[in-house]
Amino acid sequence: MKSLKLLSVFLFSISALQAQQVKFSDLKPEAGKTVSFTYDPKGTALENSQSIKCDVFLFDSKSAGVIVSPRSLIISLLKDGSIYKATVPTNDSTSLIALYFYSGSKSDNNPDGYYTPLYHHGKLNAVTYANEAYLLTSFVQYTFGTKPDLQKAQVAYEQAFILDPSLEDKLLFDYLVIRYRLDKTVGSKLMMEYIGQISGSRSVNKLALTKPITSDNPTNDKDASLVIPKKMSENDLSNTIKLYRILGEIDSADAAKNRLLKYYPTGSTALRMAADSLHLENNATVFEEKLNAIIAKYKLDVNNDKDAFHIFFTYLWLADLYAKEGNKEKFDFYANRIKNRVTRASIYNSSAILFAQKNEDVAYAAELSKKSIDLIADVKSDPLPNYTTPDKYAEKLDNDAGTYADTYASLLYKLGKYKDAVAYEEQAFAFTKDDDINMHIRYQTYLEKNGQFEKALTEDEIIIKNGSGTDSIRNDLKGLYTRLDKKGDYKVYLSKLESEGAVHERENWRSKMINIPAPAFSLMNLKGQKISLSDYKGKIVILDYWAIWCGPCKSTFPGMQKAINKYKDNPNVVFLFINTLQRDDFRVKTVKDYMNSTKYTFNVLLDVQSKKQGGQFEVVGQYKVTALPTKIIIDGKGNIRFKMTGASDNDDEIVKELDTMISLASS
């Protein structure tokens, strides 16, 4: 078969490419045995790195075709001259090993990846090929940050289906999305063939869909041999809905959705849609009533992990709503239902801030905050999740611990416990890899209140040298300078600090400047107007990517509104807010309702799901945005000059950062 010839070329090319940097000791490593390899960083981004680490991802063959996250581990690299050596332990069910090399923030992003399939008694099984296809698509994109290799993934899927045709039922949808992404015309035809087959309107052999469409075989109809009943399974209908949406057939997708709800009114899809719809409810009591109705309708046992999985995220939403309403009893009840301790620690921390906004609840807020700290400390002894590595997971937990200690310190300060506030802020610094200047500002306040004036003065100096001095900070500095009876002219002293700060801030932002052509786009805004980037030629354009579910996004909005107000009379500065990565069925209404409930004067654009990229969002993909919030600054020549992920929730800091970026992009 033609597909098998492609497969042999594919395997040969991978071996040749890996030989440049990675060499496995055995060309056909067996599962259950230790696998040895060498790594030569010459010619890669890590060539001159002093300390290189390697994350290993072990894919399992027991998944029976259901793609699951691989198990991860860190292995020790032994340096021998310029070459690194290592071994990887495997078990009988390991089907594939993928390697990821990095040093600090740098990584060896080889676009072809470093991996090897494992053999079982000298043969590769079907699931190994299925895992290979998954590795080459979603996994490399979201874990390694490299571009998917769709052609190689296609061949891997085809080989998996040949070896085990039963995998088609589970994986054919993913295969069709790849075919569509590679060639829209061919992919569309295959998708319609598949929809016709599973709906019973055509008689088609499923395996024929994986054969290449050629002039000799334009539709694969000659292989017809299987008739599917007209009543489709829930999974078939769900796939049909997704395929119609990819094809842009919205009316057909809606019809398929209605059919699904008619045939499977209490199925998993109907349950998911019902749970998702709770997103629209802002009243905690009504939300709870609707949630209880869903639990009753779908006969869910909330004490059963399998049933609770379908609605666990609603507890997070409901706990948050009750926190906003100040209902401690209900908040505690639903927060305690969140079994994932990392998630529960997060809701304790965010809700502590909400309760603290009501001065009478500061003591309770401090209790919640302390719970978040204790929980995240306990989690460190839990088993490592499959989706990450020990180093990365430890770093995440440390960052969480630093954030929660910072919150707790602020609450202790409000309670007048200044000495304890200083201690926990110092703990926050110890845990946080990249402390932000706001931590120094808070720390300075706690130190001064605790009578540690010399340290407080040092913190003021750090803040001003960073370019973050405010009138309040300068007044504090002057008072401490006098209190400590410092020698020298204060004005000269302050001028030197501020000069350092101005240079530091501008150079810091200048070092982050890039110069990449901004992809063109046209999107509809909430008013139904078509907005194109080309409309703003010659202007500075600020793109703010956000989603309703993104709390950090919304926390920056007051600062963004301040910036809009500041530049409202400047015709050369434009702000566009692109709502993206929201896949719920009520997205437009949700976004409109949210914006109508605020006083923001944002021009909100709605990113669309790409037909070419299998349902991925179009503009967010073009701009390679991988996390929210992300802000992008485009200059008057149509080039991206800044790309900033995350943001301060300090309104003045947000405006100041934008001022600097706009100024640099204009020069």
Image: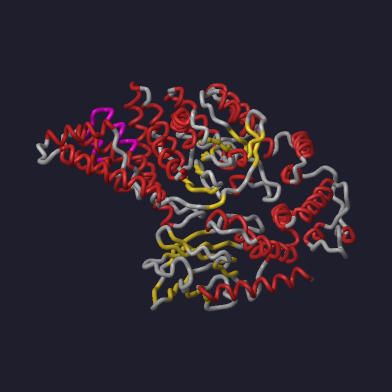
* In this picture, residue 621 sits left or right of residue 164: left
Query: What kind of secondary structure does the magenta stretch mostly adopt?
Result: helix
Question: Height in image: 624 above or below 552?
Answer: below
Identified at 40% across, 41% down, the residue is 660
Above/below status of 158 relative to 594: below
Task: Identify the residue at horizontal 51%, vertical 23% (top origin).
Answer: 599
> Which residue does the image show at 49% across and 36% down from the upper left?
553
- Whether residue 428 is visible here, answered yes or no, is no
* Residue 415 part of the magenta segment: yes
Q: Position of residue 74 (x, y in %)?
A: 44, 63
Q: Nearer the viewer, residue 489 or 127?
A: 489
* For residue 633, side relative to residue 419 (left or right): right
Residue 249 lies, in percent from the top left, at: 77, 41
Q: Quadrant of the N terminus?
A: bottom right
Quadrant housing residue 455: top left
- Closest to the observer: 409 or 658? 658
The magenta region covers 406-423
Q: In which quadrant of the rendered image does the C terminus lie? A: top left
Classify residue 217 by image quadrant.
bottom right
| Residue 516 is a magenta residue | no
The figure's colour scheme reads secondary structure
Indicate the position of residue 113 as horizontal and vertical percent values. Answer: 56, 65
Expressed as whole percent of the image width and height from the top left, the position of residue 341 reads 44, 42
Apparent side of residue 53 relative to residue 591 in the rendered image (left or right):
left
Tally of numbered tags: 0
Residue 393 visible somewhere in the drawing: yes
Considering every residue shown, the one lying at the far right of the view is 222
